[in-house]
Amino acid sequence: MQLSRFTDYTLRVLFYVASNDDRLVTLSEIAAFYEISVEHLRKVVHALSKSGYLDTYRGKNGGIKLAKPASDINLATIVGQAEGNEPLINCSQQKCCLTGFCSLQGVLGQAQQAFMSVLRNYNLEQLLSNPEMQSSLLRDDSAVIAIN
């Protein structure tokens, strides 16, 4: 199983914004940090804003910040919203000669529930508790000044 690129970018945006919570961050800043297209991130930020995880501000001095504390952002909720809660396989969508006695869908459903159960134990604040990760996500103002 692999998470989609959208989910990956969703988590990266949340990591960056939460680590720089003392100020507004910009899409272009996040894109440059991760070397990701601004257009990809625009969709991610829009979804996070609609879901109530980010506040966005337009204009010259605009930017993005968390809309709620990092401790209130649960990993299972984020992954579930980004990936959807569809079963890993949906046997009802196609005709199958094994319908009625195949147990694969049930086994994969249990695995998916276990996966989400583990994610429910973690929030954004816990994921960012590693000081090395935290410091690597902080913007280096001297590099920004050198670019400008």
Image (cartoon, rainbow, N blue to C red):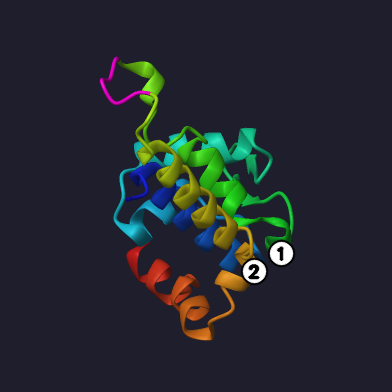
60, 92: nearer the viewer: 92
Q: Secondary structure at mark 2?
A: helix
Question: Which quarter shows the C terminus?
Answer: bottom left
Q: Secondary structure at mark 1?
A: helix
The Cα–Cα distance between marks 2 and 1, rounded to whole angstroms, is 5 Å
Residue at mark 2: 125
Residue 106 vertical placement versus 131 (above, below): above
Name the kind of residue labelled 2 in the image. Answer: Glu
Label 1: how many Cα within 10 Å (few below 14, some 14–19, many 20+): few
Image point (47%, 78%), residue name: 133
Residue at mark 1: 71
Q: Which residues are magenta?
A: 95-99
Q: In the shown orientation, is residue 72 left or right of residue 109?
A: right
Point out residue 66 in the picture as x, y percentages from the top left corner. Answer: 66, 53
Q: Residue furthest front?
A: 101
28, 69: nearer the viewer: 69
Q: In the shown orientation, is residue 58 left or right of residue 6?
A: right
Point out residue 81 in the picture as x, y percentages from the top left corner. Answer: 55, 39
Image point (35%, 71%), residue name: 146
- Would you identify the image quadrant in which residue 106 lies? top left
Q: Is residue 18 magenta?
A: no
Image point (34%, 59%), residue name: 34
Image point (33%, 64%), residue name: 147
Name the kind of residue labelled 1 in the image. Answer: Ser
113, 1: nearer the viewer: 113
